[in-house]
């Protein structure tokens, strides 16, 4: 047999953790108002423990006007009333810990809600006041100050500046918002801002959370001169010969902030508290800077998420990720999905050539999709992801094979991207549709726990019943059972999780790598069947292997210690 469970005292939990992302609005709704909530999450924790994940990451649960689905936080020390109370949060943390699950929460340090008391104070205060110095306020350009201070753009479309009305009723200064106008950016040059976030980290560490996912971790520090972005395209033009930086993305100054945060986390050693950075940066080497030994523990590997289902690209990302992380001694993470990108089962359902690196739902709408192909590839992608060294992420519903929902009616859409681009970009609602737990439409497919619930906050498609937890549980061929088996094996086999890989000889479009002496993962991305050596013992296959590894299929196998070679 392959080596068994390692001594958990030797490897910190976060180096191998499989983390399940809970998007609270869409996970489970205990009180029947059509919006997910904390009691709903609590009630489903046993499902997550049984699934076999190690931790959950909960997207923002703080009070919020929900202009960006909770990423517009109005109070970092409380819970959004629609979701529950602080007591619910405490109970959730305790229950999760009781089931052996770690709890990671989201922190959003780049911006606040415009309803946060700091911003209402800033609006009431005068230009140049300490209240305004917590944000990025500037006078406008042009003769009347009616032009934005520079050419920066909001991620959701339109300019990144909004003009305020001063106390005398006249148009006044402008403030920076890299996201919606209701998300004013904080000024991280201001020590008061830094102190405040140190305190927020301590507030939640003291309550028992095991870590934080850092929103827009690459965006906090801006060039104080606020120069125009001009023709700079991020991240491809980052590395200028003259060493200059982008005016607001991935600037060297962010790292000092994270060194401070690491020292706070280190004060809570038992169990170790961790960070994961959401940093969209240009390549593995830039990402590795966030996970140097005195900085953050982990960072999302978006290069892997962005890679098309093409062997050469995937292999390139795997190699560059492993090499860059090895240099700083940090474990890589492997992530294929989250609440910001179209569902993997749909992204994989089309010809992968020529897809842009950050595929938007609009790109998929222009292509012909083959849902069965998407499912087949998503299954293989799951086995690839969970076999790679380090940590892995599962976005809620990925384990059910949920596809992107493309046909959300205009009147139901919620994402600011849709509104700010006048419907030109559809945005992210299609991957945020509430989860199906049962096949009963009259309880919102089990999403809502009370009879006669309100409509879910985003409409669920008719096919949701077939893709529910209840429909898939116990079905040997379902995505859910594939995940359950893979996660069980991952726990049983010491060679999975933290560590390294060794590539095996194989045709160019077949990825084959060894973990330890006897475990092999093999993924066929070619158009041809691939003959597996006779003496390979299949532990798990993403689709039937009969008897060859067919295209878009992955297997986990146990090999003889005397390594057999795959045949060409
Ligand atoms: C990244 C989050 O994942 C996304 O949902 C949000 O809109 C932006 N950051 C702004 O907070
Ligand atoms: Ca609810």
Image: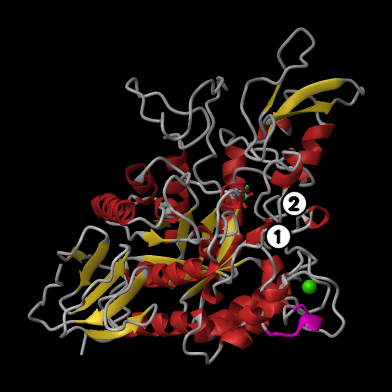
Indicate the secondary structure of the residue bearing disc 1: loop
Please state which of residues 299 and 134 is positioned toward the viewer in this rendering: 299
Task: Indicate whether residue 441 is drawn in magenta.
Answer: yes
Left or right: 46 as drawn, with respect to 70? left
Extreme residue toward the right, this view: 169
Q: CA distance from mark 2 to mark 1?
A: 7 Å
Please state which of residues 9 and 310 is positioned toward the viewer in this rendering: 310
**On the rendering, which quadrant does ligand 2 occupy?**
bottom right
Query: Does residue 291 appear in the picture of this structure?
Result: yes
The C terminus: image quadrant: bottom left
Residue at image x 46%, y 68%? 378
Q: Which residue is mark 1?
A: 62
* Disc with the residue nearer the chain's start (2 vs 1): 1
Numbered label attached to residue 74: 2
Residue range corresponding to the magenta coloring: 438-444
Tell me if label 2 and label 1 are in contact, CB under 8 Å: yes
Vertical order, 202 against 9 (above or below): above
Give the quadrant of residue 408: bottom right
Q: How far across and how far down the image is residue 324, in percent? A: 28, 49
Indicate the secondary structure of the residue bearing disc 2: loop
Residue at image x 79%, y 70%? 456
């Amino acid at each position: 047999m392959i080596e068994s469970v390692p001594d958990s005292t030797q490897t910190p939990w976060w180096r191998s953790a499989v983390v399940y992302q809970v998007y609270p609005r869409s996970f489970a709704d205990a009180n029947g108002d059509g919006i997910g909530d904390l009691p709903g999450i609590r009630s489903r924790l046993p499902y997550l423990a049984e699934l076999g994940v190690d931790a959950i990451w909960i997207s923002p649960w703080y009070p919020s006007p929900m202009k960006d689905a909770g990423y517009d936080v109005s109070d970092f020390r409380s819970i959004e009333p629609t979701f529950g109370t602080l007591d619910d949060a405490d109970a959730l943390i305790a229950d999760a810990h009781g089931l052996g699950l770690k709890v990671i929460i989201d922190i959003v340090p780049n911006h606040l809600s415009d309803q946060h008391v700091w911003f209402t104070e800033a609006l009431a205060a005068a230009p140049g006041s300490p209240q305004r110095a917590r944000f990025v306020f500037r006078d406008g350009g042009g003769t009347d100050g009616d032009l934005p201070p520079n050419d920066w753009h909001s991620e959701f479309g339109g300019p990144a500046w909004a003009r305020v009305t001063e106390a005398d009723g006249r148009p006044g200064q402008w403030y920076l918002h890299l996201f919606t106008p209701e998300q004013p950016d904080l000024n991280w040059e201001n020590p008061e801002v830094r102190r405040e976030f140190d305190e927020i980290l301590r507030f939640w560490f003291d309550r028992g959370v095991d870590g934080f996912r850092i929103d827009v971790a690459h965006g906090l520090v801006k060039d104080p001169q606020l120069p125009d972005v001009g023709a700079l395209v991020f991240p491809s033009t980052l590395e200028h010969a003259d060493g200059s930086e982008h005016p607001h993305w991935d600037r060297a100054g962010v790292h000092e902030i994270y060194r401070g945060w690491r020292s706070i986390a280190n004060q809570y050693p038992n169990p170790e508290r961790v960070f994961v950075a959401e940093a969209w940066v240009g390549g593995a080497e830039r990402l590795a800077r966030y996970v140097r030994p005195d900085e953050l523990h982990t960072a999302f590997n978006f290069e892997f998420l962005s890679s098309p289902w093409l062997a050469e690209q995937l292999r390139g990302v795997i190699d560059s990720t492993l090499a860059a992380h090895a240099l700083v001694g940090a474990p890589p993470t492997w992530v294929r999905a989250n609440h910001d990108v179209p569902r993997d089962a749909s992204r994989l359902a089309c010809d992968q050539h020529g897809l842009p690196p950050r595929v938007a739902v609009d790109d998929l709408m222009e292509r012909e999709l083959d849902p069965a192909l998407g499912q087949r590839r998503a299954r293989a992608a799951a086995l690839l992801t969970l076999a790679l060294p380090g940590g892995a992420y599962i976005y809620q519903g990925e384990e059910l094979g949920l596809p992107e929902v493309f046909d959300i009616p205009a009147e139901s859409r919620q994402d600011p991207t849709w509104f700010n681009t006048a419907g030109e970009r559809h945005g992210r609602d299609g991957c945020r549709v509430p989860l199906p737990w049962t096949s009963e439409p009259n309880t919102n497919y089990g999403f809502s726990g009370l009879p006669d619930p309100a409509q879910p906050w985003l409409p669920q498609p008719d096919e949701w019943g077939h893709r529910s937890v209840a429909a898939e549980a116990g079905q040997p061929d379902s995505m859910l059972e594939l995940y359950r088996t893979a996660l069980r094996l991952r726990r049983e086999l010491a060679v999975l999780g933290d560590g390294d890989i060794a590539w095996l000889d194989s045709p160019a479009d077949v990825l084959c790598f060894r973990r330890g002496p006897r475990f092999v993962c093999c993924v066929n991305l070619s158009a041809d069947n691939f003959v597996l050596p006779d003496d390979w013992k299949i532990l798990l296959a993403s689709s039937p292997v009969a008897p060859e590894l067919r295209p878009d299929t992955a297997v986990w196998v146990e090999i003889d210690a005397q390594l057999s070679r795959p045949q060409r």
